[in-house]
Image: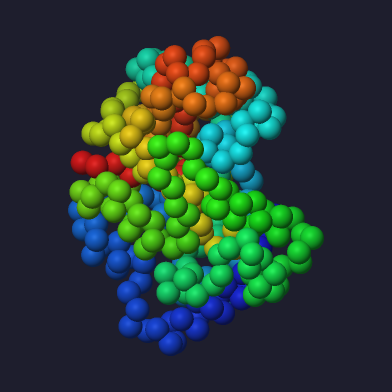
Amino acid sequence: MKFNLLNVYALFSLSLMVGSHAVTPEVYWKSVLPNSPMPKAIKDLLYTAEEKNTNAGVGKRYVGVTHKTVILIYSVPMDELKVDPNEASFFLENDLHEGTEMKLHFVKDEQKSAFLPRHVADSIPFSSNKLPQIYDKFSIKSNSVEAKSMKQTLSVCESKGIEGEEKYCATSLESMVDFSTNKLGKKVKAMSTEVNAEGSTPLQKYTIEGSMKLASDKAVVCHKQNYMYAVFYCHKTVSVKAYAVSLVGVDGTKVKGVAVCHTDTAKWNPKHLAFQVLKVKPGSVPVCHFLPEDNVVWVPY
């Protein structure tokens, strides 16, 4: 899928001219989170002035199995998910120890849609009832694959969250920082999965070399969405545990993974793929999965 971002770049360039004193996303991050390094998933989406004459940010978006299975937990009926159970990366919490082997598929975006500065993103409509205006602004045909993808993202963002979930779609890095720190406080760190490979790696066996539980049982997890510019579906839950996990693939690929374990699955759809893969019942045991590289987990420290 490709998005024509010429109009996005024009908006960004205009913002630089009319808002030259506006705080950049990087500066805002450092001002709010001076002791928290920016994870690679976020650095990769920062817009630079040099990108305006390149194809950077024009997204052919391949959504891997991991991404689909993760976001569908929170957005659409789980029994609509049709993927090969052998490729689904669900596992149990007691699997998180040295020596455990599991088949995983880490998929990279071929190209990434970049963050817009907040004052630019806030000036663009972001609502299903404004879709004609949005399509027109970005020269998107209403019957195109891109239009369908954008419509789906808006639908997910406007849907009612599951019980106990606090959700928000961040249309800028600044708004993501604000939501996460509002829910968890400013003593937080953001983490993302990092795969030591240039492109997508094959479905293969990985071995856990070590794991460490992160400090709190509450977290904000932000999932990258398909859109003209960077949009993240963020949600806070108190029934989750996060782990930093080191893995190595059979081909030597090294992964610094972020795993999330959901400790309360009682209200998930009984037909959810996780229960089929793990052969467990809703609410019986924590269900875990690795986050894709373009997702971010925020945890207190």
The location of residue 124, given as percent across then percent down, is: 54, 72
Residue in the picture at 36% in, 30% down: 239
Res 94 → quadrant: top left
Residue furthest out toward the top: 279
Quick check: can you spot residue 67?
no
Res 229 → quadrant: bottom right
Residue in the picture at 56% in, 41% down: 75
The location of residue 98, given as percent across then percent down, is: 35, 17
Q: Is residue 121 left or right of residue 151?
A: left
Q: Is residue 6 left or right of residue 46?
A: right
The location of residue 228, given as percent across then percent down, is: 60, 63
Residue in the picture at 21% in, 58% down: 34
Q: Is residue 232 left or right of residue 208?
A: right
Q: How is the image coloured?
A: rainbow
Viewer-closest of 91 and 246: 91
The C terminus: image quadrant: top left
Residue furthest out toward the right: 143
